[in-house]
Every structure is written in structure tokens, then in C-alpha cells.
Amino acid sequence: MKIKVVTALVIATALFYISCGGGDSTNASSGESSSQPAAAEDSNPSSYDPNRGEGKFDEKNVGIGPLDAAMAAKGKSIAETKCFSCHKTSEEKLVGPGWKGVTTRRAPHWIMNFITNPDPMIDKDPEVQAQLELCLVRMPNQNLAEQEARDIVEFMRQNDGTQ
């Protein structure tokens, strides 16, 4: 009887590991393995800029002006699909932290880097790591397009009362 239980547990563990993305996955578009080590500078937390984040966005390529209501409406629609199962627009934590005030604490380009590229930032940013200790769940990569990320930032700005 013990052998059947142990065998069942081993099989269940293996299935769980595989279904949760364990093992060596291959990037279909490039044929590269996602488990290859990062470049030395990418894995060095000391080269990380906590004001910019990790990604391609910075203050030069993320233009912020007066609130764009149409973009905010698109951002809200995207957030309802991809974000609101874990986040609330208030300060209240759901699975992840509440969004209220996020645009006063973080620059728009940092937010865009985080929502389009969360894994490297979770691994390097001390404040994000502290938030992870509170929430206990890593933010998944939702594979947002650049414009979707920008629309979500605009919705966040609207949520925070930006004019």
C-alpha cells in the first residue's frame, strides 16, 4: 500500500512541476532555451537602477502629458481582463498590492518596465522583493504589448486623480 501512495505522490509532483513551467522550456519563436543563464550584467543586482527598472522604457521613450481619457478607458478594459483578478484600484491588497497611489510612488517608465518585464525586476529590485514577501505570489508576465502597458499606466494615472 505504501508503494502505491509513494508512486502516486511522485507522479503528482512530476505533473505539478511540469504544468507549472518547471523543466527546460524552449522559446518557440527563437528556439532558445529559457533556462540559459543571463548575461553577467543582467544578473548583477548592483547594475540595477531602481528608479528605472529593468526593461526598454525610460523617461525618453515614455511621453506623459495631460491625462488621455481614451487611453485610460482602453487601459481599464485591459486591466479588467489581465489585472483585476489580483489587484484592486484602492489601497487594499487582493493577491497583489492595491493600485491607489502607484503613479505617485513610481515613474511611468518604471511601471511599464515592471508590467511588461516583471521577472528580472522581481529578482533585482529590493522594494519589489519586499512586496513579494507581503503578497507571497510573483506577478506573472501577462505578455502585454507596449501600447497596452502605456494604456494601463494612463488608467493608473486616472485612478490616482491625474488631470
Image (spheres, rainbow, N blue to C red):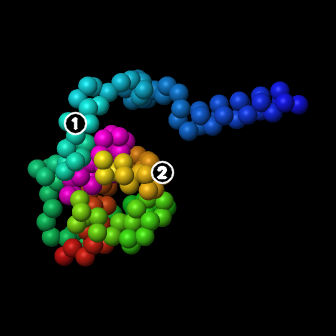
62 vs 103: above or below: above
List x then y, in percent, for residue 154: 26, 65
CB-based contact (under 8 Å), mark 1 and mark 2: no
Where does the N terminus fall, quadrant-wise?
top right
> Residue 96: where, in percent of width, then height?
44, 59
- Which one is in front, 127 or 31? 127
Span of residues in magenta? 107-125
Within-10-Å neighbours for mark 2: few <14, some 14–19, many 20+: few
Mark number displayed over residue 137:
2
Whichever of callouts 1 and 2 sits on the residue coming sooner in the sequence is 1
* Of residues 105 and 156, the one drawn nearer to the viewer in this rendering: 105
Q: Nearer the viewer, residue 40 or 113?
A: 40
Q: In percent of the image, x 36 and y 24: which residue is there?
A: 37
Location of residue 7 by image quarter: top right
Amino acid residing under circle 1: Ser
Instruction: Tell me, yes or no, if residue 162 can be seen here.
Output: yes
What amino acid is labelled 2 in the image?
A: Val
Q: Please tell me which residue is depicted at 19% across the width and 44% down the height of the picture.
A: 49
94 over 50 or under it: above or below: below
**Relative to 99, 84 lies left or right:** right
Helix, strand, or loop for circle 1?
A: helix
Which residue is painted at 13% across and 52% down in the image?
59
Mark 1 residue crowding within 10 angstroms, few (<14) / some (14–19) / many (20+): few
Vertical relation: 85 (above or below) 130: below
Figure label count:
2
Residue 117 appears in view = no
The CA distance from mark 1 to mark 2 is 24 Å
Location of the C terminus (image quadrant) = bottom left
Image position, residue 48 (x, y; %): 22, 40
